[in-house]
Image: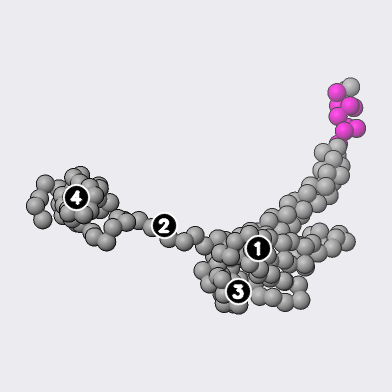
Amino acid sequence: RRALARSNGEHGYVMVMFALLLVPLLLMAGFAVDVGKWYSRSSDMRRAADAAALAGVVWLPDEAAARTAALAAAARNGFVPSSTVSITVTSSTQSERRLKVSIQDTKVGSFFYSSLGGKDITLDRTSFAEYVLAVPMGSPRNFFGTGTLLKTYTAPGIPAEYLYQSVNPYCTDK
């Protein structure tokens, strides 16, 4: 009888606890969805800024052409300057071959946060790109492919030197 009497007073405990914990669990799930949306938006902004910087840097030192190419690349990636989205393209003062692209979105919304009274957040991402000139390779002399591989070239008036590259196969005369 005692066991039966004790169990009668505990009916509904799980239901009450579930009802009390359901609200915080739903709030946490909603916040996780909103943070995921913000993270995805910032990732898209980073990708667009990277693409814009890489597209524009090849036009430097012509800043107008670099800006046009960078804005076109940002537009292809879904970011067009508007009342909420601003795109800044500037060349660096440190190098004439370096470009900085910043994308800022001042009105990134949410699914659940705004319904609880939260405001839109501001996200911004910045990317840099630098155009590196070609590395000179090959012989500093005005000839190519003379002599056999792994041997030195000697001629009257020209000092012996190792070839940088040879067009003839190994162990052949020509």
Q: Decide if residue 171 is in sight here.
A: yes
Q: Decide if residue 26 is in sight here.
A: no
The residue to which callout 1 is attached is 93
- N-term mark: 4 or 1: 1
- N-term mark: 3 or 4: 3
Q: Amino acid at mark 4?
A: Tyr
Q: Quadrant of the C terminus?
A: bottom left
Q: Amino acid at mark 1?
A: Thr
Q: In front here: 127 or 78?
A: 127
Q: Quadrant of the N terminus?
A: top right
Residue at 66% across, 68% down: 90
Distance between the Cα atoms at labels 3 and 2? 24 Å
The residue to which callout 4 is attached is 153
Mark 1 neighbour class, 10 Å CA radius: few under 14, some 14 to 19, many 20 or more: few
Query: Is label 1 or label 3 in front?
Result: 1
Distance between the Cα atoms at labels 1 and 2? 23 Å
The quadrant holding residue 35 is bottom right
Residue at 86% across, 37% down: 13
**Which type of secondary structure does the marked residue at label 1 adopt?**
loop
The residue to which callout 2 is attached is 135
Residue at 27% across, 51% down: 164
The residue to which callout 3 is attached is 63
Query: Is label 4 or label 1 in front?
Result: 4
